[in-house]
Amino acid sequence: MKFLKQPALLAIGMICIGLILNFGTNAYIQLTSLFVLVNCLMAMSLNLVNGYTGQFSLGHAGFMALGAYFSAYASMHWPLFSGPLAILNFVLTTLGSGLLAAFAGYVVGLPSLRLKGDYLAIVTLGFGEIIRVSLLNMDFVGGARGLSGIPSIPNLDLGFMVIEHYMVSFLFSTFWFVTCFFVIWRIMHSSHGRGFLSVREDEIAAEAMGIDTTKTKVRAFVLSSFFAGVAGALFCHATNYISPSSFNFQKSVDAIIMVVLGGMGSMSGSICAAIFITLLPEILRSLKEYTGGIDFRMVIYSLSLILVMLLRPQGLFGQTEITDLWKKYVKRSN
Amino acid sequence: MSNAQTNSSNIILEAKNLTMQFGGLKAVDQFSFSIEKGQLAGLIGPNGAGKTTAFNMLTGVYMPTSGEVILNGEILNGKKPFQISHKGLTRTFQNIRLFKDLTVLENVLIAGHQHVSYGLLDTFLQNDRFEVEELKLRNKALEILALFGLADKAFENSCSLPYGEQRKLEIVRALMTDPKVILLDEPAAGMNHSETHKLMDLIAQIRKDFKLTVLLIEHDMKLVMGICEKIFVLDHGVKIEEGNAHHIQNSKKVIEAYLGVDEVH
Ligand SMILES: Nc1ncnc2c1ncn2[C@@H]1O[C@H](COP(=O)(O)OP(=O)(O)O)[C@@H](O)[C@H]1O
Ligand SMILES: [Mg+2]
């Protein structure tokens, strides 16, 4: 059970934050905190493909959409459990979302990852659009109107106490955040992860050293799609409403911005950038009161992106992790 | 058993009529050769003779236009480079292809990946299987690095090494795959005289220690003469001569091929 120690520590830290948010803030901030977790999942998973493996996927929102629509539809129409066990429906649908997205990742990835260069970018771009346009034309999921009335994750009745639904959602999202983080982190600190990196560095040399580059790329892509699907599921139960435009091209670009801004190949970077990108527009929202109703939000948002990329073209963290900085600090103070 | 038979069963790497056509250019033309187990063979020829192209066909980077590559009696045509590496045929690159952003140690560890048996789940569970294998891999990598005097640079970025050491690192990385046959593409390029001689001694040494068969490309003729037991000479994609150092040195065709290049210069 040693392997659960670090995840447990991270989870406990997150739960403390969750408790503060639960008792100390309002519904708006609480909802934003769920979006932060969803975007962290999106950024971490895309970083696996775009950062570590050096492939360029432009369709991450497509996988998120699959996950979101699946979990939304399944929880509305196929509830297996009711009463106090209703939470299990969400456990199952979220897992199903991940698996569905992973399967789609496999189908999309296998042919396109065999090819070199920009094919993946084009194919994934197409995939994202196909998903969005298909959803637009599917009446049973609401077409352009979207799906509304998606159930939230319910209160959890433990008998002696009731955990409120925000806290349950937060715990649930935290579980997936921690899982995603440690799955990717540990893979990247193993021989398999070094295989991913070798594909990014030099495919010809990697093959000559015995790395099956196609299999490696497909693996990264499937794993990444899985967590995008999970992120979609968490997203739909947080907003209770989704439509095809929730998963447009802009959403894929947002995920890429998070990865690039944080530093391609840095998990700390992806997480920090995801938090930054999610919170910045919300923080800037209040600016409107001081500018006489003119919305400078997007201007500042874009400017800050340009500034970061000019000052740190390798991203906030480059390829390093927070733990590396810590190690360096310890070394210096010794 | 007759002498001829024992010889042929000793052959580990063989090429039959290898041809590579790039548009109108026949970079390699009907190239046949065979190398015996444990031999140190050389492939020489002027620049542009088709030596690297031959390596690329042997290791599956290029699909030969025609001809066959046979390793240990098994035809390699159609196999992917990584599969050929798993079969025990590996190489270094003339235009150094290290994993630049990774450390020296990581570069070597990657080549050991094909011998790793733990799966993705084991990495998450951080179980004994994962930890034991990682430790073994690391120790093995550090051991080979030490042979080449690179162990104390294990945690440096590979692209920060001086040129000569980058070439050595390429050899270390190739050795980490546990090869039977190793192809070295101009391993001494860019090194000075004494470095080159040290490297050649080292290559002769590892051939013994690792029970390797070595085929090396070198366009400096004098250099290969010293250590290679068998030498093939390519010129304009065609094999013009093969034999031991003495034979090659006295071959009119070889002298002409090299002189021809000198005249152009
Ligand atoms: N991928 C390629 N496409 C077209 N021509 C090539 C390619 N690779 C090599 N050549 C040509 O084939 C010839 C042999 O090149 P090469 O094998 O690199 O020579 P060497 O290694 O003996 O110096 C050269 O004329 C080179 O320009
Ligand atoms: Mg060459």
Image (cartoon, rainbow, N blue to C red):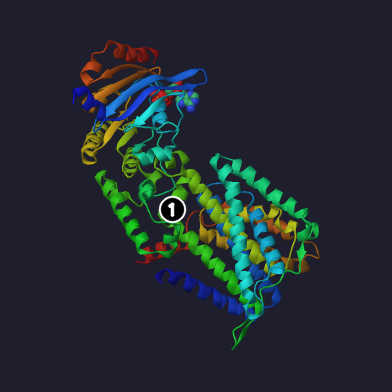
Q: Is residue A12 above or below residue B203?
A: below
Query: In the image, residue A172 lies at what x, y percent?
Result: 59, 72
State which quarter of the image contains the C terminus of chain A.
bottom left
Q: Is residue A144 above or below residue B33?
A: below
Beta carbon at label 1 within 8 Å of ligand 1: no
Total number of numbered labels? Answer: 1
Query: In the image, residue B206 lies at what x, y percent?
Result: 24, 39
Residue designated by label 1: A192
Q: Is residue A76 above or below residue A54?
A: below
Regarding residue A258, the answer to whether it shows in the image is no
Quadrant of the rendered image containing residue A4: bottom left
Query: In the image, residue B54 lies at what x, y percent?
Result: 39, 26
Residue A309 relative to residue A53: left or right = right
Q: At 79% from the left edge and 57% from the top edge, which residue is drawn?
A: A139
**Label 1 Cα crowd, 10 Å radius (few <14 / some 14-19 / many 20+):** many
Of all residues, the one furthest to the front in this rendering is B1
Query: In the image, residue A263 lies at what x, y percent?
Result: 54, 54
Q: What kind of element bears circle 1?
A: helix
Chain designation of label 1: A
Which amino acid is tagged 1?
Answer: His
Residue B178 relative to residue B1: left or right = right
State which quarter of the image contains the N terminus of chain A.
bottom left
Residue A73 relative to residue B20: left or right = right
Q: At 77% from the left edge and 55% from the top edge, which residue is drawn?
A: A138
Q: Is residue B25 above or below residue A87?
A: above
* Depth check, front residue: A295 or B145: B145
Of all residues, the one furthest to the bottom in this rendering is A160
Quadrant of the rendered image containing residue A2: bottom left
Regarding residue A128, the answer to whether it shows in the image is yes
* Depth check, front residue: A132 or A24: A132
